[in-house]
């Protein structure tokens, strides 16, 4: 095979043994809309929790009860409750626990880490006189404990559900589309060869793509709701019925186009062709000037002034 006679299009057309387009990693924001602003948080504490004054002190009993429920959940289900240190790779610590789960559905580990998150604190409002000052809530950020529930789902494989331990108890949910695809292939009885984050080969590539396309918004929401009701809750059933229940939005989504080449040599030819076919990026009309000093706004403004 000659490099000079092989184009990227030819390589992808003639030497790709498997091609699958799918969701890779999806990070979801799980939050209560009514509690994202100071006025909503204040209304909740006064109307639902019956506190005469809405302050951060009124949030402490809720947080304490939530943490106690998490610790009780860990004891009841005999789950390890680990503290992640600063700079530790959570994936490396959790991996052995997930491997020992052997694909069984359930939570396998709870991890705790100090992270910055949005919350509320109490400050003093100002009236026309100093005597009119009153406590009010201010939306801010703080370092609080975040609890990671690492688990395995029968249809989606590995995931984690992260809850903030402090008001308004915002959560994050992370899933992997490749893990979902592996589960679906196994349930359909389709043989495949797995990669750490994807598949290398598949007995039925067409059906593999069909299964990947079947990962819908409805299935993702059902997954989050399924595990939400199984885990400790910071809010009572009455409060959830009153509208203080979680909603879901996409915080980050990554998509993958997996193209498996037939042999290592083809991979080398692919990169050679990619470099060769993009040499025009170095042509004069494509070149950008790179300055060795920082161009400030003032310097930019001076450059725009007409020359004397």
Image: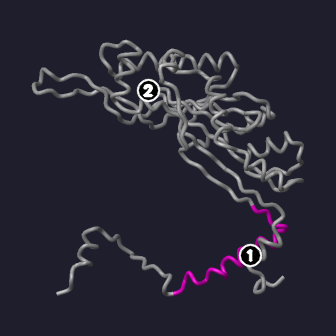
Q: Earlier in the sequence, mark 1 or mark 2?
A: 1
Q: Secondary structure under badge 1?
A: helix
Q: Splitting the image into 4 quarters, where does residue 112 fall?
A: top right
Please name whichever residue, 41 or 216, is drawn nearer the observer in this view of the structure.
216
Circle 2: is it few (<14), some (14-19), or many (20+) Cα within 10 Å?
Answer: many
Which range is magenta?
Answer: 259-283
Q: Is 121 included in the stretch rendered in magenta?
A: no
- Marks 1/2: CA distance? 54 Å
Q: Is residue 266 left or right of residue 147?
A: right
Circle 1: is it few (<14), some (14-19), or many (20+) Cα within 10 Å?
Answer: few
The way the protein has been coloured in the rendering is one colour
Pair 1/2: label in front: 1
Q: Position of residue 107 (x, y in %)?
A: 69, 28
Main SS of the magenta part reads helix
Q: Which mark is residue 9?
A: 1
* Residue drawn at point x = 53 percent, y = 44 percent: 251
Q: Position of residue 23 (x, y in %)?
A: 67, 50
Q: Is residue 188 left or right of residue 23?
A: right
Please name whichever residue, 246 or 259, is drawn nearer the observer in this view of the structure.
246
Q: Which mark is residue 160?
A: none
Q: Is residue 116 left or right of residue 68?
A: left
**Where 164 falls versus 61 (above or below)?**
below
Q: Which residue is mark 2?
A: 167
- Seen as rendered, the residue at the extreme left is 129
Q: Splitting the image into 4 quarters, where does residue 263 fall?
A: bottom right
Q: Splitting the image into 4 quarters, where does residue 48 fall?
A: top left
Q: Position of residue 298 (x, y in %)?
A: 24, 69
């Amino acid at each position: 095979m000659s490099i000079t006679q092989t184009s990227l299009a030819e390589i992808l057309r003639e030497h790709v043994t498997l091609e699958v387009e799918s969701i890779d990693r999806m990070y979801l924001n799980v939050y209560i809309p009514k509690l994202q602003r100071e006025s909503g948080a204040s209304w909740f504490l006064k109307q639902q929790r019956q506190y005469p004054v809405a302050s951060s002190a009124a949030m402490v009993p809720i947080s304490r009860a939530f943490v106690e429920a998490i610790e009780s959940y860990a004891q009841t289900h005999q789950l390890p409750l680990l503290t992640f240190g600063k700079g530790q790779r959570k994936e490396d610590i959790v991996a052995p626990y997930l491997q020992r789960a052997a694909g069984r559905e359930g939570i396998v580990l709870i991890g705790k880490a100090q992270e910055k998150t949005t919350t509320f604190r109490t400050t003093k409002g100002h009236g026309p006189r100093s005597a009119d000052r009153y406590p009010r809530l201010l939306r801010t950020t703080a370092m609080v404990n975040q609890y990671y529930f690492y688990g395995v789902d029968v249809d989606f494989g590995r995931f984690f559900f992260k809850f903030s331990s402090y008001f308004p108890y915002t959560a994050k949910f992370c899933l992997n589309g490749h893990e979902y695809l592996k589960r679906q292939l196994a349930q359909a009885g389709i043989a495949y060869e797995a990669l750490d984050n994807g598949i290398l080969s598949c007995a039925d590539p067409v059906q593999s793509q069909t299964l990947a396309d079947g990962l819908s918004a409805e299935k993702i929401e059902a997954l989050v709701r399924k595990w939400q009701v199984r885990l400790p809750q910071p809010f009572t059933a009455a409060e959830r019925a009153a509208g203080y229940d979680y909603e879901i939005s996409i915080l980050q989504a990554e998509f993958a186009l997996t193209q498996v080449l037939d042999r290592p040599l083809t991979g080398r030819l692919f990169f050679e062709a990619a470099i060769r076919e993009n040499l025009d990026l170095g042509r004069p009309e494509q070149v950008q000037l790179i300055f060795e000093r920082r161009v400030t706004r003032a310097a930019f403004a001076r450059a725009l002034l007409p020359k004397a």
